[in-house]
Amino acid sequence: MAGMDASLPARTVMPKPQYVMAADGTRIATYTWGDDDAPTVLCVHGFASSCKDNWVDTGMVRDLTAAGFRVIGVDQRGHGASGTPHEASAYRMSAFVDDLVTVLDTYLLVEGVRYLGYSLGGRVGWQLAVQAPEHVSRAVLGGIPDGRPLARLQIDQARAYVDEGAPVDDQVTRNYVTLAERVPGNDLRALIALAEGMRLGDADPDPADPPRQPVLFATGTEDAIVEQSRSLAAATPNGTFVEVPRRHHFNTPGSRVFRQAAAEFLAVG
């Protein structure tokens, strides 16, 4: 992917997942790199991606371990090696937050970690930092949507495509389907259920109740949500914002600017 630095060490090896059981019985795949005694960064990927796709293949895990961090990555429910329920109710925002609290408790990280999330992972990170502030000391929220994640995806068209092979007319929905099919092993029915589940309950970030920890917001200049992400940063008491030049929503995590800004910010404190 563009933005890789050839001077850095070779590509990170993907370990076998270690599983944590969520409260509803969904298995959550986790991965670890680095020294157990080092400061820990929890890395959480975006929609239709995975820990490998967002953080290993882009070089982010390599950068963080080279900087002396321990890294814990997760495949969020519906993704990667984690469980893929097909019911929309399994994908409420509260379920994603509870999964991460369970992961951190299982790893005995009771005093908080540094958090790195992108897109859906950024949105979940906002909520985790607000609802369980003891678990997050500082956070990088990349490409964070200002409203309900996946709100523009047309559920009926996506479901008809999966069930019947019907063409997808809506461009946004077609983009998401293409993104989902790009990652081998993705369960499209689970991802459609996720998109539907994001519309249940209170999934919008509330600018009136932002995280209080130091937070770096990082969004590509070509991303349609860049101004909304900037507004969320302005509403966050200890928030800062960085533009990632010439990057759109789907290729920002591989940018050297993004990786360096994230690693430097997470190293403070």
Image: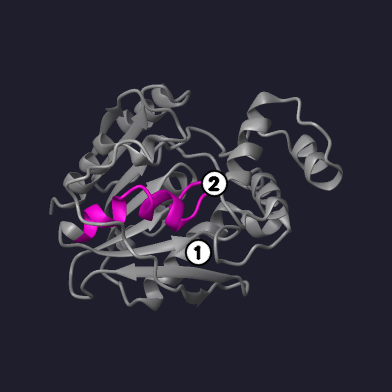
Q: Secondary structure at mark 2?
A: loop
What type is the residue that disc 2 sits on? Phe
Pinpoint residue 262: horizontal percent, then vertical percent.
25, 44
Q: Name the quadrant of the C terminus.
A: bottom left
Residue drawn 45% across the image and 32% down it: 249
Instruction: Name the residue nearer the viewer: 149 or 52.
Output: 52
Q: Would residue 212 be found to the left or right of residue 178 on screen? A: left
x then y, percent, for residue 96 = 52, 58
Q: Amino acid at mark 1?
A: Asp
Q: Which residue is mark 1?
A: 98
Residue drawn at x 76%, y 25% is: 169
Residue nearest the viewer, comparing 141 with 130:
141
Q: Does residue 235 lie above or below 69 as drawn?
A: above
Image quadrant of residue 104? bottom left
Task: Please state if 253 lies on the left or on the right of 22 as rendered.
Answer: left
For the N terminus, the quadrant is: top left
Q: Assess whether residue 61 is covered by the magenta stretch.
A: yes
Q: Say which residue appears at 63% left-offset and 45% top-offset.
A: 181
- Which colour scheme appears in the figure? one colour
Provide the residue designation for mark 2: 47
Q: Residue at x 28, y 42 (%)?
A: 4
Q: Quadrant of residue 251?
A: top left
Q: Residues within 10 Å of mark 2 (few under 14, many from 20)?
A: many
| Residue reaching furthest to the right | 164
200 w.r.t. 239: above or below: below
SS category of the residue bearing label 1: helix
| Left or right, 137 with reference to 174 | left
Q: Which residues are magenta?
A: 45-65
Mark in the foreground, 1 or 2: 2
Residue 46, which numbered label? none
